[in-house]
Image (spheres, rainbow, N blue to C red):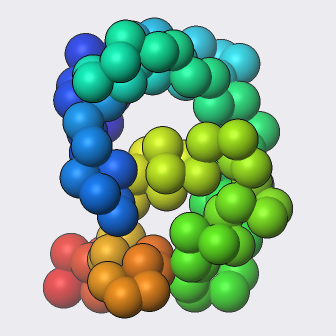
Amino acid sequence: MRLKGRTLETLGRARPFLIEEVTEHGIEVVVCSTGSVRYIPRTNVETGWVELCERGELTLDDIRKRQTEANPAYGGALLAELPGIVVEADPIRLRRDRDKVHGR
């Protein structure tokens, strides 16, 4: 899955942001409305994925507390792009759907 150059939206408010750069160290995003640059360390995305696989779900509050405290909206949107992830609303929750991972 190629992320660089894609525009994604935050899960709660659907605010667009551009994936400016993806490196072995992390992901740089640009907030479309302000031009502000945010950086999501690779370790935060990986830790979020591991926790999502182990627990089966994460809320944005979980992400804020454990993964990307400064940028939970962007971290959550990035995790939502991974295969087999289903987004549920109110509260926003990422859930791992094993059937979608395996193409069932």
In depth, the one of 82 and 19 nearer the eye is 19
Q: Residue at x 37, y 88 (%)?
A: 90
Total numbered labels: 0
User: Horizontally, is 52 left or right of 25 in the view?
Assistant: left
Q: Residue at x 37, y 12 (%)?
A: 35
In depth, the one of 42 and 34 nearer the eye is 34
- Quadrant holding the C terminus: bottom left
Q: Position of residue 57 (x, y in %)?
A: 56, 84
Q: Position of residue 36 (x, y in %)?
A: 47, 15
Q: Position of residue 19 (x, y in %)?
A: 36, 22
**Residue occupying the far front of the picture:** 34
Regarding residue 77, the answer to whether it shows in the image is yes
Q: Position of residue 1 (x, y in %)?
A: 30, 36
Q: Residue at x 77, y 39 (%)?
A: 43
User: Horizontally, is 8 left or right of 70 in the view?
Assistant: left
Query: Could you say which quadrant of the image residue 18 lies in?
Result: top left
Query: Could you say which quadrant of the image residue 31 lies in?
Result: top left
Regarding residue 97, the answer to whether it shows in the image is no
User: Horizontally, is 44 left or right of 72 in the view?
Assistant: right
User: Horizontally, is 103 left or right of 59 in the view?
Assistant: left
Q: Residue at x 29, y 57 (%)?
A: 13
| For residue 81, above or below residue 88 | above
| For residue 36, above or below residue 69 | above
In depth, the one of 99 and 65 nearer the eye is 65
| For residue 30, above or below residue 72 | above
In depth, the one of 103 and 3 nearer the eye is 3
